[in-house]
Amino acid sequence: MEIVETKDYEEMSILAAEKVIDRVLKQPQITLGLPTGHTPVGLYKRLVEDHRKNETPYQDVITFNLDEYTDLSPDHPNSYHYYMNHHFFQHIDIQEKHAHLPDGTARNLDLECERYEELILKHGGVDLQILGIGQNGHIGFNEPGTPLNSRTHVVKLSESTRKANSRYFHSLQDVPYHAITMGLATIMNSKEILLLASGAHKSATMFRFFHEAVTPDFPATILKHHPNVTVIADRPALKEA
Ligand code: GLP
């Protein structure tokens, strides 16, 4: 595992963007796995700026998002569909049919999970998976206790995650109780992984990430079994590590 410490959030975002741009230029048909949350906002901003300036092409890039809430329509401002359009997709030349997110409004959610997992496999898996990390060690929405061999599935969100994410909603009651997420095995299947972390509120999380053995109690620890992981994290996030 390669660990890159940056001065701050800006530098983390710049270095992450450089890596993504490098991979896209080398492999124009790359399949990217994409996260949401606050952490990657700066990365998307840099990618959009770069696209405007240098016309880095995305027309053949395929993307799969990690997760989506259930019961929020794609145009709901708190849905991850909306987030991705707002921060990234609408600013680049990606083809709509190439940008995939789980459908949290599907009538049969288990079937939707199967469809999503199969679609990822049909595309040959994710080449570069970008991840944030939840304070309780979740990646995607794989909460503590998620089996390490899990594939795309429906999850019940933990109260701590609902609370952490409620900052984007009017109130805690508005935060969905469930989500669809790629599983831990889905994530581990990707060829390369880039984990981003920023801020002092993630320092205890990063301490556990580095010092705990692989355990479902802290799902991100599974990344220690992956042969090609880069962590880009800022100084505040690494201050305890
Ligand atoms: C959310 C997302 C994760 C994300 C995590 C951290 O629950 N499902 O994919 O990595 O929270 O979010 P943030 O980057 O806002 O700290």
Image (tube, rainbow, N blue to C red):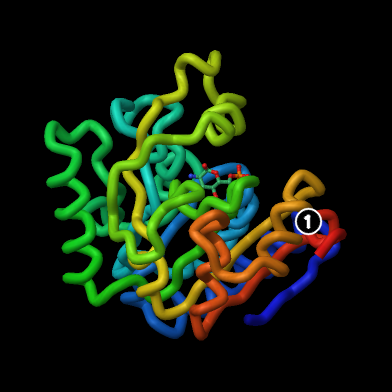
Quadrant of the drawing holding the N terminus: bottom right
Residue at point 53%, 21% (across, down): 169
**Residue beneath label 1, please?**
237
Q: Is residue 152 above or below residue 32?
A: above
**Residue toward you, 40 or 138:** 138
Q: Residue 75 appears at what percent x and percent y?
A: 33, 28
Residue at point 40%, 33% (across, down): 79
Q: Residue 44 appears at what percent x and percent y?
A: 55, 53
Residue 106 figure quarter: top left
Quadrant of the drawing holding the C terminus: bottom right
- Does residue 115 appear left or right of residue 88 in this picture? left
Q: Is residue 174 above or below residue 166?
A: above
**Residue toward you, 111 or 156:** 156
- Does residue 92 appear left or right of residue 144 in this picture? left
- Does residue 113 appear left or right of residue 206 in this picture? left
Residue at point 29%, 26% (across, down): 71
